[in-house]
Image (cartoon, helix red, strand yellow):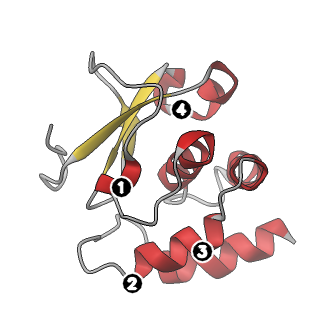
Amino acid sequence: MDCPHCDGDLVAFAVPEDFRKYAPDETGSATICATCLRVEAAEGEAAGADPDFSAVDDSFPSGRGGVATALLLGKLDSLALNRADISELADEAEQAGADPFLTLDRLASSPTIEPHFDIDRRRPQLEQLME
């Protein structure tokens, strides 16, 4: 599967029921682009219960923490509109053992990732939000 925005590879993942309110179109599955980090509703793709987020980056969290982190990344293009969701997803990621700040740092330094938002600008804003 290729991203319609940048032709990057898409990683499909299942969205647990309690995360669906954060998912695009509140669907049960979504995709994240391994290049631009856009998160969109999956259109008929079969998403596994334990997706391989290493296609995005080797350091990307796995499991529930990875899903929360992916959904969080999908919301970072508009911090003002998604403030509550971002805060809740960051908390969920941390509770699942993922570190969203470390993930952002690693994604920012990856030579293959060209996010649709400014990671370097969003990271300190996210830190302020979480204080």
Instruction: Name the residue: 53% across, 72% down.
Output: 104
In the rendered view of the protein, which quadrant contains the N terminus? top left
Q: Which residue is mark 3?
A: 102
In what element is the residue under mark 3? helix
Taking depth in this image into account, of 85 and 65 the one nearest to the observer is 65
Q: Position of residue 94 (x, y in %)?
A: 74, 56
Place of residue 73 in the rendered image (x, y in percent of width and height, measured from the top left): 51, 55
> Dot 1 corresponds to which residue?
54
- Residue 8 lies in what quarter of the image? bottom left
Of callouts 2 and 4, the N-terminal one: 4
Q: Earlier in the sequence, mark 4 or mark 1?
A: 4
Q: Is residue 46 visible?
A: yes
Label 4 crowd bin: few (<14), some (14–19), many (20+), radius 10 Å: many
Query: To which residue does mark 4 refer?
Result: 23
Q: CA distance from mark 2 to mark 4?
A: 26 Å
Which quadrant does the C terminus fall into?
bottom right
The residues tagged by marks 3 and 2 sit, at their Cα atoms, a distance apart of 11 Å
On the image, numbered disc 2 is attached to which residue? Answer: 109
Q: Position of residue 47 (x, y in %)?
A: 36, 24
Vertical comparison of 76 with 39: above or below: below
Measure how far apart labels 4 and 3 are at the Cα level. Answer: 22 Å
Q: Nearer the viewer, mark 1 or mark 2?
A: 1
Task: Give the percent coordinates (x, y) of residue 9.
Answer: 19, 49
**Three-letter amino acid code at the position of disc 4:** Ala
